Image (cartoon, rainbow, N blue to C red):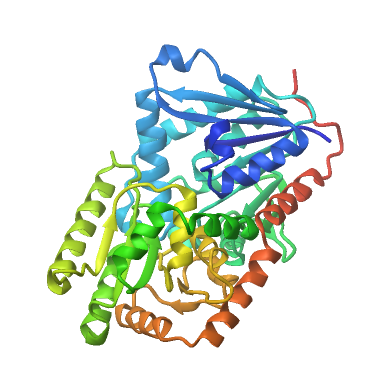
Amino acid sequence: MSRLVVVSNRVASPTETKGSAGGLAVGVFGALKDSGGVWFGWSGDVVSDTVANQGPKLEQDGAVTFATVGLPKKDYDQYYRGFSNATLWPVFHYRNDLAVYDREEYAGYRRVNSWLAHRAIKLLQPDDVIWVHDYHLIPFGEALRSEGVTNRMGFFLHIPFPSPQILLNIPPHEELVKSLCCYDVVGFQTPGDQAAFHDYIVRHAHGTATADGQVEAFGRKLKTGVYRIGIFPDEIAEQAKRGEARQDVMDLKQSLEGRKLIMSVDRLDYSKGLVERFKAFEHFLEKSPEWRGNVTLVQIAPPTRSDVDTYQQIRHNLEYEAGRINGRYSGLDYTPIRYMNQRYDRWKLMSLFRESQIGLVTPLRDGMNLVAKEYVAAQNPDDPGVLVLSQFAGAADEMTGAVMVNPHDIVGMSEAIGRALSMPLAERRERYETNMKMLRKYDLGVWRDSFLADLRGVDQTKPASRKK
């Protein structure tokens, strides 16, 4: 089997792949171990120009080579803080009001992608299969093609792909879509994301797109598909059970003093609907006085992109709302919202999910949201909690046993909390089983293997190689 080369904005360390890594890291590392290969990307370090140009740092773990590079401050500012996260992230999450476009940042975004491609090309072998991940690296494949690389290349988008009317707000939208068409396979999380891409191809790129995913545009033919990223549910369940007897979890249970527990875990990001969630919980306490003192919301929101002004404002807003609501409803022995702006070990989160009666997952827009799936997998099958899920999360297509909500509807979310807290055991079990069937049908291995099968199956009329 040909080697696999995975390219992502950040590369998990060999240690992370064996412990605390998330879904992307676990999935791609499994594929790399099977076929052997290279994982290439940014180390996460901001370094001097001299250090950045020394070439990738290589670390070997069995058949897998971890190859990382640092970014100079200017590149970090323009590529990562700038176009990737100040333009693409908000627009792709339907927040044009928060998007900032700067031509120099866009030029930096393309420059860094070309620079990364030039670094990666020295690691490639003629028959390697290349799998590129996420919005930071949309032009990466095009940069490789311009260097003469003809290997099979696939791209997977982990976040939503916006409708054309939204995407048009990015001035170089056509260049971005043209870059995507340089890949052989382009994967999306949901049918809606794929349909939005096809809509753009037909209406704005004057190309063609068929129901089976065949696209022709900008002089290229490619395949698109829906590949639902998942988890390994049995591994999550085992983690949750193992953590039940650990001291941290036991301390939390004791501190709750028999109160019901609602768990929410999100990165600190405006796409997650955190303020709306707090207001919905406040409305619930206001309209259901019998629950005051009897239910606690634990919100874990580790910081992200803390050097971006927008994210600093999110943190301030959330801290204000938590303090205001707690000031209104706290008692001497009761705090309704426990808000924690820090990271926790994965096993601890899974154990807390297992102890809770509700998993509250209400993003305003999300590519998939693996927290929703992890919450379900962590439950005790004999006495499961209830997933309350936003209809705008990609997971909503699969987690049909959840109580669905519109995260813009504060009253509706409040009512869903009340319904979930009072739900009979038989209904909770039925909903849990419905969700678990989908978790097993579309687990992480299926996501990985189905994408790579389509990519390896790309028809090439000549051997994949790099032009000299």
Residue drawn at point x = 72 percent, y = 28 percent: 63
What residue is shown at x 55% (from left), y 41% (from top)?
Answer: 19
Residue 367, percent across and down? 51, 58
Q: Is residue 464 left or right of residue 59?
A: right
- Rendered residue at 59%/73% (across/down): 381
Work out whether 359 lies above or below 33.
below
Vertical placement of 336 versus 25: above or below?
A: below
The quadrant of the rendering that contains the N terminus is top right
Can residue 411 be spotted in the picture? yes
Please name whichever residue, 259 or 105, is drawn nearer the observer in this view of the structure.
259
Please indicate whether residue 287 sits to the left or right of residue 4 in the image: left
Foreground: 253 or 70? 253
Q: Residue at x 77, y 36 (%)?
A: 35
Residue 76 location, quadrant: top left
- Considering depth in this image, is 267 or 251 the residue closer to the camera? 251
Q: Is residue 95 visible?
A: no
Does 435 appear above or below 58? below
In-image side of 329 versus 341 (left or right): left
User: What percent of the width, then of the height, locates residue 266?
Assistant: 39, 56
Identify whether 82 is placed above or below 188.
Answer: above
Quarter of the image with the C terminus is top right
